[in-house]
Amino acid sequence: MVPTQWYLLLSAVLFGLGIIGVLVRRQAIVILMSIELMLNGANLLFVTMAREIGNLSGQVVVFFVVAVAAAEVAVGLSIIVRLFDNKGTVDVDEINLMKW
């Protein structure tokens, strides 16, 4: 049996790598993948704590997080495709649609 601390450490590592990916990288696709990595780290934490406590409520939360993440990917990718069509790049530093 794997100790709970290892799951918590893996969850923290996944979440930390996601944060680093969001802060360091400038491509929109990589930022979306980093957000997904952060969500997976949080999901692992929810499932681990649900198993530790013996309650299924953490797994129900994970189900909803996965559903929201799927919608986020669909909307995010469609926005990225439209931005690439309009601007020719997916670099978030070069996309300045809000400027006049």
Image: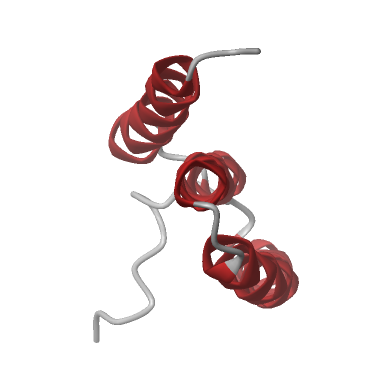
Point out residue 19 in the picture as x, y percentages from the top left corner.
33, 37
Number of marks in picture: 0
Q: Is residue 42 above or below residue 70?
A: above
**Taking 22 as reference, is 43 left or right?**
right
Residue at left offset 65%, top offset 13%: 1
Point out residue 24 in the picture as x, y percentages from the top left corner.
32, 29
**Taking 42 as reference, is 19 left or right?**
left
Point out residue 74 in the picture as x, y percentages from the top left corner.
75, 72
Out of 71 and 82, give the one closest to the viewer.
Answer: 71
Res 20 quadrant in image: top left
**Taking 90 as reference, is 31 left or right?**
left
Out of 74 and 98, give the one closest to the viewer.
Answer: 74
Residue at left offset 34%, top offset 49%: 93
Q: Is residue 21 above or below residue 35?
A: above
Out of 84 and 1, give the one closest to the viewer.
Answer: 1
Point out residue 90 in the picture as x, y percentages from the top left corner.
57, 51
Q: Is residue 44 above or below residue 100?
A: above
On-image quarter of the C terminus: bottom left
